[in-house]
Each structure stands twice: as structure tokens, then as C-alpha cells.
Amino acid sequence: MNRVNLNQPSNSMRSYDDILHFPHHVSATHPQMPVSERAAQFSPFAALTGHQKAIKEAARLTDEKIELDENSKTILDQKLQNLLEYSVDPPEATVTYFQKDSKKDGGSYRKATGIVTSIHSHKRTMIMEHNLEIPLDDIVDIQFSIHS
């Protein structure tokens, strides 16, 4: 069994004896980094920047748009016609509509409650107060009551 003497330098250490006691080099052209900034070079490296956001986005669920049957379309059309009759003093309505997701297939169903300010049949849109524009083809339900 070989014994190692810890007080004696190893052969590999002896090969550096000629440069071991040289003075520390200080650059004449590059200023020394402040001690307060030296720790930054040891900070963790985030190689997968945005990876957690991508995972969250992929896991986010979206709904598929429901296609209304003819009977539901007829009822919805009748409700729109009833709303148009009250253009002078329109009632407050709650509109359920599909909003397409901007980042992936599908979307979500939203509800907006307020006064319907206009319906543009040529543009196929409904405008509610606060300039909320809803495509008529995305509306699945309208609820309102007339108070006499």
C-alpha cells in the first residue's frame, strides 16, 4: 500500500513550481470587475427561459364552439328581433357568446351584461355599451326582460 505524505507536494504540484509565486496579473486596458458584481457570474443560468409559460399555455383548456341547431337559431333570431323593437328604451341584456382564443384552437364562452346600443345586420355584429362588439354568429344566448 502506497502512503501519501500530505506535507509534501505531489509530482503534479511540483510542475508548477516555476510559476506558482508570480504576482497576480492586472490588466492595463480592462478595468477590474467590482467585487459587488463578481457574484453575478455564479448566478443560476435559466437555459429554458419561457419553458414554464409554454407548459402552462399548453395545459390551458379551451372550449370548442357549439354549432346551434336550426331551432336554437330561430329562437335566437326572434330574441334579436325583440331587442330591435325596443331601440328607444332598450332593456339590459345578458349575452352569452363564444370568443375565439388568440393563441390556440378553440376559445371560451363569455357573458356580457349591459345595454345593447345597436345591431349591424350588414356587419353581423352587436354593439353593447362600452363599445363591446360581438359577432352575431358567435352569440349562443340572449337573456333580457322587459319592465313595463
Image (cartoon, rainbow, N blue to C red):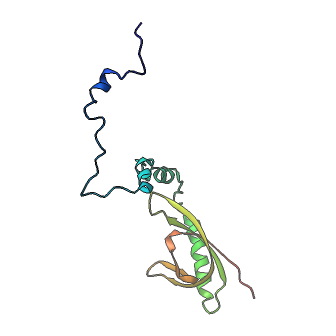
Query: Considering only vertical position in the picture, is 82 above or below 111?
Result: below
- Position of 78 with respect to 24 (left or right) is right
On the image, which quarter does residue 81 sit in? bottom right
State the count of labels: 0
Foreground residue among 14 and 56: 14
**98 or 81: which is nearer to us?**
98
In the rendered image, which quarter contains the C terminus?
bottom right
Q: Looking at the image, which residue is at 26% across and 35% down?
A: 19
Question: In the current view of this chain or complex, which residue is farthest to the top?
Answer: 1
Residue 36, picture quadrant:
bottom left
Q: Residue at x 61, y 77 (%)?
A: 79
The answer to which of 70 and 112 lies nearer the viewer is: 112
Q: Position of residue 25 (x, y in %)?
A: 28, 47
Residue plotted at (26% across, 53% down): 27
Q: Residue, x 56% and y 83% (percent of image)?
A: 130
State which quarter of the image contains the N terminus.
Answer: top left
Foreground residue, 20 or 125? Answer: 20
The furthest residue to the right: 148
Horizontal and vertical percent for residue 72? Answer: 59, 67
Q: Position of residue 75 (x, y in %)?
A: 61, 71
Vertical placement of residue 81 versus 24, above or below: below
Q: x, y (%) of residue 57?
A: 49, 54
